Amino acid sequence: MWGKDKLREECGVFGVFAPGQDVARLTYYALYALQHRGQESAGIAVADGRQVILHKGMGLVPEVFREEHLRSLRGLAAIGHVRYSTTGASHPVNAQPLVFYCSQGMMGLAHNGNLSNAQFLRQKLLATGAIFQTTTDSELIVNLVARFLEDEDFPAALRCAMAYLEGAYSLVILSEKRLYAVRDPYGFRPLCLGRLPEGWAVASESCALDAIGALFVRDIKPGEILEIGPEGVVSHAGPAAPRFAHCVFEYIYFARPDSVLDGFTVGQVRRELGRQLAREFRPPADVVVPVPDSGVAAAHGYAEEAGLPLEEGLMKNRYVGRTFIQPSQELRSLGVRLKLNPVREVVAGKRVILVDDSLVRGTTSAKIVRMLREAGAAAVYYCLSSPPVIRPCYFGIDISDEAELIAARLSREEIREKIGADGLYYLSLEGLLRPFGEMARHLCTACFTGDYPFPVTGCRKTLTPRRPHLLEV
């Protein structure tokens, strides 16, 4: 949200099977609801029973699609994608969905997540004669599925391809007549199923189902393949993993507060994390101020538990886009002020509890603390509703270099001094997991602990492929 001082999730996906309805427009509305998951590119692919038609481009959903685009996308099923790049550069060729031809006709694919063995797969596929048009790991999935479709039906081909894939992938896939949804065996990234009056929808988050009037049915299970066609929804079992590993950062920051992920409403979880933070750390203070928008729910919980007033001490400019022109070095320091501005009447002379979701690199945090001091705050205590981020993520978050993480290099006291706060408080790992109960054992917390669900080497296969000869040189 603030330059490079926030973790970024790769993308959001959506799919709908609803013959006779305006599936492109339904997808457009759903992508609007998922815009927070990716702002670099957007795309919609539609299947009409004979072919798959695609429109995609760089930018936000309303920048990519005009009325004439939606009118031209007619069919019985559609998939959509909003992207923030983690694997593959921010370039039009990497925008999704990807549409391709194979032995069974045309298909489209959209992917949320990150393959941790992408380099291994690319090298092997290139050695067997594969040709790639993008730099995304999603095209590796396309290539594998297409190979297996030469002598398998679609669900079997997907299951075979999954045997090669390591890491995070929630997929929506179109054939010319059907929609498929796939969630990786660990369940890193969310994916859910919804019911329309005359059709079905799948989405990264339930808020996208709400946006089109679909009834939330259930989360798609880790390792599950859903086949959706005129007969309804058929579930196929894919490869199993030794454990589930749902990304805990979906609850801390990525997902929209009104979404329900694996049985938990995101906003309620964040509020409870704020309450737990107040139980663990309560420095002497006069007011609680959230960092908008990521710290709002946790700040509500903190204020309730601490018995302190909650005030909008930082105002967010809702009209600043993803980027803005910074014409000179002298003006670059104004960057944060274009997005946030302190409310002097709220913070002047007050001891402020500043609540945010996480601290990644620390650069923006220092600017926010300085702004509050310049506005007259007597003290600023920076409180975070998550533990220190000390390890890279290989499963769809744009942190792959430990050197970027301030908590991996500096102690808490050193970070406090660097950002200029009077106090710096992180939620404990135990406090983070408390709201989840038994579900806590199914969460991936590797960015806080270094305890990855499996050893990540970038050049291994977790599962035994059904047809290993396809990658033999």
Image (cartoon, rainbow, N blue to C red):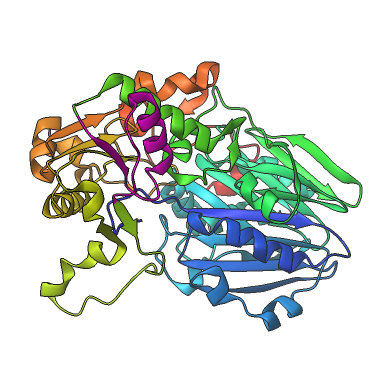
Q: How many marks?
A: 0
Quarter that holds the N terminus: bottom left
Q: Nearer the viewer, residue 241 or 76?
A: 76
Q: Pick out the residue farthest to the top.
A: 438
Q: Pick out the residue farthest to the bottom.
A: 68
Q: Nearer the viewer, residue 115 or 90?
A: 90
Residue 212 is situated, as x and y percent measured from the top left of the image, at 72, 56
Residue 415 located left or right of residue 194 = left
Q: Is residue 392 above or below residue 119?
A: above
Q: Is residue 2 magenta?
A: no
Residue 247 located left or right of residue 214 = left
The magenta segment is: 285-313
* Residue drawn at 50 percent across, 29 percent down: 245
* Residue drawn at 36 percent across, 18 percent down: 430
Residue 402 is situated, as x and y percent measured from the top left of the image, at 24, 42
Residue 345 is situated, as x and y percent measured from the top left of the image, at 23, 52
Q: Is residue 30 visible?
A: yes
Q: Is residue 189 above or below residue 367?
A: above
* Quarter of the rendering containing residue 143: bottom right
Q: Nearer the viewer, residue 192 or 418?
A: 418
Q: Is residue 364 above or below residue 393?
A: below
* Residue drawn at 43 percent across, 71 percent down: 91
* Residue drawn at 10 percent across, 73 percent down: 330
Q: Is residue 286 magenta?
A: yes
Residue 287 is situated, as x and y percent measured from the top left of the image, at 27, 37
Residue 438 located left or right of residue 397 = right
Residue 437 located left or right of residue 231 = left
Q: Is residue 137 visible?
A: no
Q: Nearer the viewer, residue 136 or 247?
A: 247
* Quarter of the rendering containing residue 411: top left
